[in-house]
Amino acid sequence: MNNYAEIEKNCRESGSFCERNYNLADKTSMKIDGRCDFFAAPKNEEELYRLIRCCRENDVPYFILGKGSNVLINLFCGVVISTANLDEISADGTEITAGAGASLAAVCRTALENSLTGMECLYGIPGSVGGALFMNAGAFGGEMKDVVKSCRYIDENGNICEMNADNMELCYRNSVFRRNDYVITSVVFRLQDGDQNAVKARMEELMQRRRERQPLEYPSCGSTFKRPENGFAAALIEECGLKGYSIGGAQVSEKHSGFVINKGGARFEDITALVEYIKSVVREQKGVELECEMIIVDN
């Protein structure tokens, strides 16, 4: 069993929130009773840096959690580190700097307030800035790679570094951060001057489309599967007759087949069983191997 004494001491001395045997239901958008051995929410970048260094020095595994909008957690035997307190946002000309824990929606609203355009398609994505960059989140034809200029991050050696977008290897739902032990701490967005009314109208239009097409009234991790080559996961799932199919409290949304939702009281096992069933049926009927988009944690 891991010894968390030093990590707890580090958190207490810095005034950062921490708790052992923590229930993560309220920290993830799927709202299931996942747990971790230790949960910590550092107050700023410096405390995040110190906490990660402490985990590494004591050989304690850690997992970085933003808004939890694309993560399904059953059990994590280590420290779940929340970036929620790294949420400062500032605008300077056509650039916006945001902490990794800031919500992407809040950054979009800051762009609107400053009459900046370029982020409208990202409005409504329920993730954090760090998580959105980590997976190169996108919607309605736009992605993070279209608007990111640079970021600050903690590298595998514990150094606080900066990286330009050209080096982030941003592609469909992937980035250099997914393949390395890097922890994003803040992101700089480069936008363009725009007409505030036009920016607002576009944001409202896309948000309305989300409400009409996506099951926002239920807990979920967003799109459950990545887009397969030459097709759409939702269409394949619906063609296989799985729309509305459920296992326990987990269900294929009746509004959008690309979403697995928590219809009520879903357990980790319900969701993962449904995901695997969908994959097997689509594989058998369509010859397509669906790849899960959400990150599944169970160790």
Image: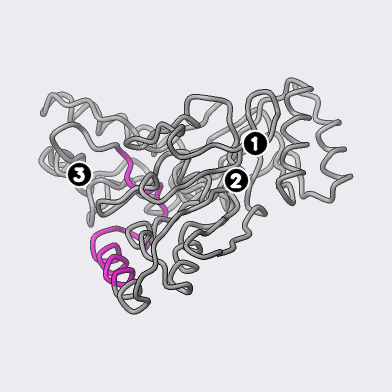
Residue range of the region highlighted in magenta in the rendering: 202-225
Whether pointer 1 and pointer 2 mark residues with C-beta atoms closer than 8 Å, the reply is: yes
Disc 2 secondary structure class:
loop
From the image, tell me which residue sits under label 1.
36
From the image, tell me which residue sits under label 3.
234
Q: Residue at x 44, y 48 (%)?
A: 148
The residues tagged by marks 1 and 2 sit, at their Cα atoms, a distance apart of 7 Å
The residues tagged by marks 2 and 3 sit, at their Cα atoms, a distance apart of 28 Å
Q: Amino acid at mark 1?
A: Cys
Sequence-earlier tag: 3 or 1: 1
Q: Tell which tag, 3 or 1, sits nearer the viewer.
A: 3
Residue 208 on the magenta segment: yes
Q: Residues within 10 Å of mark 1 (few under 14, many from 20)?
A: many
Q: Residue at x 34, y 33 (%)?
A: 292
Q: Amino acid at mark 3?
A: Ala
Numbered label attached to residue 24: 2
Q: Amino acid at mark 2?
A: Leu
Give the quadrant of residue 250. top left
- Which quarter of the rendered picture does the N terminus lie within? top right
Disc 3 secondary structure class:
helix
Q: Residue at x 35, y 32 (%)?
A: 273
Q: Residues within 10 Å of mark 2 (few under 14, many from 20)?
A: many
Sequence-earlier tag: 1 or 2: 2
Which x, y percent locates residue 165? 45, 40
**Residue lying furthest bottom:** 197
